[in-house]
Image: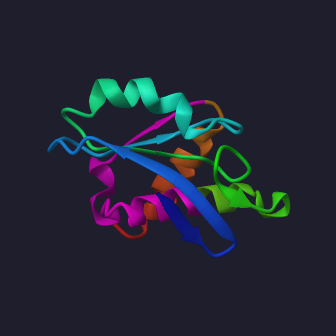
Amino acid sequence: MFIDIPDGKLFALKAGGGGGTPIVAIGGWIGSSELWIDPMAQLNDAHPVVSYDHRGTGLSMCAASDITFDALVADAIAVMDAFGIARRHCGGICRCANGAGGGSALRGARVASDHC
């Protein structure tokens, strides 16, 4: 599915729907949602798992000038919102990340904590 953001569109995938803790998988700087397909298959029986293509990767569409760390963090939160992952339950959301995605996950947890 494509998620509208103020300056483009993000491509995102969701697998599973088990009653477990939602997992938001955030790839590294140039990683796309494809990196998470195998792990998603392993987890989706017990957990809803969401992954997305960062700005400038995969099928997401944004101008290169729009790629900033703050924008990447806002994108992670936009993905959570689009899939109905309640930010008020921030402590109950697992964010898996690799590489630079770790920074987005950590900053996102801090930013989203304002809404918890």
What residue is at 40 percent from the left and 66 percent from the top? 81
Number of marks in the rendered image: 0
- Looking at the image, residue 109 sits to the left or right of residue 11; the answer is left
- Looking at the image, residue 76 sits to the left or right of residue 44; the answer is right
- Relative to the observer, which residue lies in front, 43 or 87? 43
What residue is at 66 percent from the left and 37 percent from the top? 100
Q: Which residues are magenta?
A: 74-98
Q: Is 76 included in the stretch rendered in magenta?
A: yes
Q: Give the farthest residue toward the bottom.
A: 6
Q: Quadrant of the C terminus?
A: bottom left
- Looking at the image, residue 7 sits to the left or right of residue 27; the answer is right
- Relative to the observer, which residue lies in front, 45 or 73? 45
- Relative to the observer, which residue lies in front, 71 or 16? 16
What residue is at 35 percent from the left and 63 percent from the top? 87
User: In the displayed structure, would residue 112 be above or below residue 35?
Assistant: below
Which secondary structure class fits the magenta region best? helix
- Looking at the image, residue 86 sits to the left or right of residue 100; the answer is left
| Residue 2 on image: x %, y % | 52, 61
What residue is at 30 percent from the left and 63 percent from the top? 86
| Residue 112 on image: x %, y % | 44, 62
| Residue 34 on image: x %, y % | 54, 33
Q: Give the farthest residue toward the left.
A: 19
Colouring mode (rainbow / by chain / secondary structure / one colour): rainbow
| Residue 107 on image: x %, y % | 56, 52
